Image: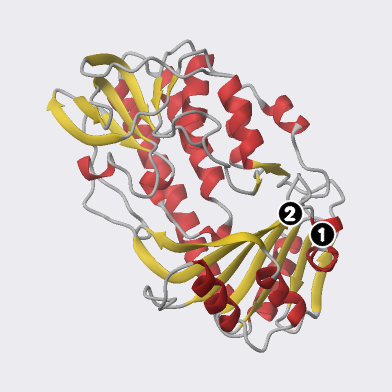
Amino acid sequence: MTTTAHHATGRTAHHPLAVLGGGLGGLTLARVLHVHGIPAAVFDLEPDAAARTQGGMLDIHHDSGQPALEAAGLHEDFRRIVHPGGQALRLLGPDATVHLAEEDDGAGGRPEVDRGDLRDLLLSALPAGAVHWGRKAVDVRALGDGRHRVEFADGGAITTDLLVGADGAWSKVRPLLSDARPAYTGVSFVEADLHDAARRHPGAAALVGGGMFMALGGGRGFLGHLESDGSIHVYAAVRADENWPPAAGPAALREAALAAFDGWSERLRALLADADGELTLRRIHALPVGHRWERRPGVTLLGDAAHLMSPFAGEGANLAMQDGAELGLALAARPSDPEAALDAYEQAMFARAEASAVESAASLELMFGPDPVAGMLAMFAGAVEE
């Protein structure tokens, strides 16, 4: 596991290649570069690797996330952390009628892993000190000749010959390349957890099943998953304007979320009513479909910094890892011409990100539009035929 690095507080350190953001995309890039003997310094705002939980389950796709792990030399290790049964799927209507129930037969191309386990796998495969924790970027500027300077909240700063913005939706690096800003998609999530579900929440456990769970209707829905630790992680999705809910505070959020599902089965509403701890409101934002920029020396973006989209195509983490791997491979293939490497990476990334963003936007309309259950059943049937 990488350790907390000493901060260069008050001083300016130089790193030939610097990555802002220690999420899955930035870590995949650093690992692929390491495999090819190219050092990279990763700077993350979290105080350490264990500062916060990393979210729920991820399905790692056979055509994006898994090839990225192969490029990182970690595919066999990845197979050991796969959650058995995680590719099971259940689709319900608002009355809790089950319209589709598929078990995980182990043959699917999207095995599920815990996001935290995957991040730990990537971190453990980097040299000690590669990740510099507690480095929150507050200013990023171009110095000319492709060099950049990053200033951190702790008073330290770095300069770099190649800066990669892997720093998420509200990237500090993006403004160097693009004026685009994420816009609200019209959907908000209320996030909930039910711990030790089989014992403490048996009704919810029976409802959700062993893997992915969806209940959709009327511009609303529940999206859930049985986690590897036996808890259920649920997103209650509501199509609403940006000032919903009108009142603030934990009690008001739970009340508003439950009110949004008035008339739904009490078995489904219990996913909110019986949730452990406080609920969390998350507004879903996206960059414009087809977001791209002109090549500028010494800087690029990957993952959400480059192509933030709604999560309804399940592509975000996979694309970020694919970006990281392909950028690393491009730089390794052209060590004497990084600009050509960045251009080749960006042109391929723009095309695949646009295709996924189109799919994601269409899925949002399908899931939160009229008759989503019929639409999802037709989509799943089409996928099986393919």
Residue drawn at (57%, 42%) of the image: 54
What residue would you read off at disc 2? Answer: 195
Counting the numbered discs, the total is 2
Q: Which residue is mark 1?
A: 200
- Asked if the residues shown at circle 2 and circle 1 are in contact, with their CB atoms under 8 angstroms apart, the answer is yes
Residue 31, how many percent across, how many down?
52, 22
* Along the viewing direction, whichever of 138 and 21 lies nearer the viewer: 138
Nearer the N terminus, badge 2 or badge 1? 2
Query: Is residue 350 shown above or below 358?
Result: above
Identify the secondary structure beneath mark 1: helix
Left-right relation of 95 to 68 = right
Q: Which mark is residue 22?
A: none
Residue 306 percent across, percent down from the top left: 37, 45
Residue 143 versus residue 227 in the image, above or below? above
Q: Could you say where residue 253 lies in the image, as x and y percent from the top left?
A: 51, 71
Few, some or many residues within 10 Å of mark 2 (<14, 14–19, 20+):
some
- Counting from the top left corner in percent of width and height, residue 261 is at 62, 82
Image quadrant holding the N terminus, namely top right
Quarter-wise, where is residue 328 in the image?
top left
Tell me: 269 left or right of 370.
right
At a point 33% along the width and 53% down the height, the residue shown is 291
Q: Quadrant location of the C terminus? A: bottom right
Q: Amino acid at mark 1?
A: Arg
Identify the image quadrant of residue 340: top left
